[in-house]
């Protein structure tokens, strides 16, 4: 897929690049030129540029690390740059200018790199000890601080009066018990109104006669009508 850029898009990209270049810290530009001079072997020029950046107020730890490297290279001993290494480590811990120091020192090897890492490690340990001391001081101060009076929100609520407490001791639990209603004196309906009741003295009124009982006993049929009877 081929990308096509309109003239307007190209103009916007160029404008953004110009604004980014203008927004860059000029001390960063001086530091960049110093690093290029150091790696092409012009250590004296690199130190001169770094002196200018530091004198202008640079708080970049990389500038101090590389100036220490320049001093070590020109003096023939890493001890010549130890003061700058220490300043750089302190600036790195304080974080006044956050930069990727490890990336900047990737190409630095040998005794100079070992000296730098030793200083950085000591600075980190010192920073940790300082932090722990501050924590202990705050803890001791909080222990010695006088007790603070409770705020209004910390005051416990007023207890409920016994008269309004349903669980107060000695409370008459029968208070307010409803009175049972008296039994009704309404007369009982007469037996004659019972649809399933029997009238007095007429208990056998609905009894079928014996002659109509299909299961009742009856006299034997005449012999002439018996198909199995004897002649």
Image (cartoon, rainbow, N blue to C red):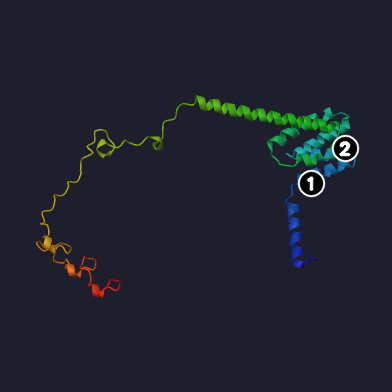
**Which residue appears at 87% of the width and 37% of the height?**
44
Name the quarter where the N terminus is drawn: bottom right
Q: Nearer the viewer, residue 62 or 193?
A: 193
Name the quarter where the C terminus is drawn: bottom left
Q: Is residue 203 above or below residue 147?
A: below
**Which residue appears at 24% of the width and 36% of the height?**
171
Q: Nearer the viewer, residue 136 or 41?
A: 136
Sequence-first tag of 2 and 1 = 1
Q: Which mark is residue 17?
A: none
**Which residue appears at 79% of the width and 42% of the height?**
103
The reply to whether dot 2 and dot 1 touch (C-beta < 8 Å) is no
Residue at mark 1: 29
**Which residue appears at 82% of the width and 31% of the height?**
114
What x and y, as percent, mark residue 132? Answer: 63, 28
Name of the residue lying farthest toward the front:
231
For residue 96, what is the image quadrant? top right
Q: Is residue 49 above or below residue 1?
A: above
**C-alpha span from label 2 to label 1:** 18 Å
Query: Mark 2 Cα within 10 Å, few/some/many (few <14, many 20+)?
Result: some
What x and y, as percent, mark residue 205? Answer: 13, 66
Query: Mark 1 Cα within 10 Å, few/some/many (few <14, many 20+)?
Result: few
Q: Secondary structure at mark 2?
A: helix
For residue 91, what is the image quadrant? top right
Q: Secondary structure at mark 1?
A: helix
What x and y, as percent, mark residue 88? Answer: 75, 34
Name the side, left or right, on which 185 lies relative to 66: left
Q: Nearer the viewer, residue 217 or 19?
A: 217
Name the side, left or right, on which 42 lies relative to 89: right
Residue at mark 2: 44
Name of the residue lying farthest toward the right:
41
């Amino acid at each position: 897929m081929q990308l096509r850029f309109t003239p307007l898009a190209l103009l916007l990209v160029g404008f953004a690049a110009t604004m980014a270049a203008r927004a860059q810290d000029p001390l960063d530009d001086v530091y960049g030129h110093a690093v290029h001079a150091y790696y092409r072997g012009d250590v004296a020029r690199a130190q001169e540029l770094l002196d200018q950046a530091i004198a202008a107020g640079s708080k970049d730890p990389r500038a101090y690390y590389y100036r220490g490297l320049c001093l070590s290279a020109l003096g023939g001993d890493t001890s010549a740059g130890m003061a700058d290494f220490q300043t750089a480590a302190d600036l790195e811990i304080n974080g006044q200018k956050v930069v990727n120091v490890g990336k900047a020192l990737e190409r630095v090897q040998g005794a100079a790199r070992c000296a730098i890492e030793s200083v950085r490690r000591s600075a980190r340990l010192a920073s940790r000890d300082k932090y722990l001391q501050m924590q202990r001081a705050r803890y001791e101060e909080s222990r010695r601080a006088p007790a603070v009076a409770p705020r209004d929100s910390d005051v416990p609520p007023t207890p409920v009066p016994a008269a309004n407490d349903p669980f107060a001791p000695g409370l008459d639990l029968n208070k307010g018990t409803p009175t049972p209603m008296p039994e009704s004196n309404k007369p009982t309906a007469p037996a004659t109104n019972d649809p399933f009741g029997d009238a007095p003295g007429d208990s056998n009124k609905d009894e079928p006669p014996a002659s109509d009982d299909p299961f009742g006993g009856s006299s034997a049929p005449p012999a002439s009508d018996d198909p199995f009877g004897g002649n």
